[in-house]
Amino acid sequence: MKSLAQPATRELRGLALYRDHHDEIIHEGHGSYRVPGCGGGTYTVDLAVFTDEPETCSCPDYQRHKQTCKHVYAATVARAKSRAKARREQHQRAASRASRGSVASLVAAL
Ligand SMILES: [Zn+2]
């Protein structure tokens, strides 16, 4: 359990990073993301999606503390968002394949 006296600042900074810079987060494939850093450079986040290893980041914060950093959180959000988008598009394709009218509108309402 995390103490409430220690706010989850890395999580919050990761969310803020995603909110402000999600256009600059680039999925390079295989769970690897390029995430902008504060100083104008970019860091490479590996979400290790195909292994049981923990996710890693090339930034100094992660290298020093070996704790999930804000870049990892931002990349995690980016991955979740792109998955949700893919699911929505799947629904839309299914809806357009379904016969027009009531079935399509039912599926679209899901
Ligand atoms: Zn990082």
Image (cartoon, rainbow, N blue to C red):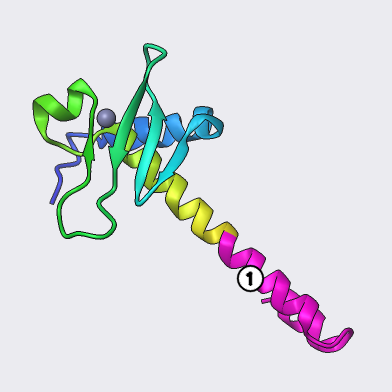
Main secondary structure type of the part rendered in magenta: helix
Residue 98 part of the magenta-drawn span? yes
Q: From the viewer's perspective, is 2 left or right of 45?
A: left
Residue 64 visible in this rendered orientation of the protein: yes
Number of numbered labels in the structure image: 1
Against 81, is 15 above or below?
A: above
* Near-viewer residue (44 or 5): 44
Against 10, is 76 above or below?
A: below
The residue lying furthest to the top in this view is 39
Please provide percent x and percent y for residue 18: 46, 35
Rendered residue at 15%/37% (across/down): 67
Magenta stretch in the rendered image: 86-110
Q: Residues within 10 Å of mark 1 (few under 14, many from 20)?
A: few
Disc 1 is placed on an element classified as: helix
- Three-letter amino acid code at disc 1? Gln
Q: From the viewer's perspective, is 15 left or right of 69?
A: right
Report if the beta carbon of the residue with label 1 is closer than 8 angstroms to ligand 1.
Answer: no
Residue 109 visible in this rendered orientation of the protein: no
Rendered residue at 42%/13% (across/down): 40
Please provide percent x and percent y for residue 45: 30, 37
The residue lying furthest to the right in this view is 101
Please provide percent x and percent y for residue 1: 13, 52
For residue 61, what is the image quadrant?
A: top left
Rendered residue at 54%/60% (across/down): 84
For residue 89, what is the image quadrant?
A: bottom right
What residue is shown with label 1? Answer: 90
Q: Quadrant of ligand 1?
A: top left
Quadrant (top left, top right, bottom left, bottom right) of the C terminus = bottom right
The residue lying furthest to the front in this view is 29
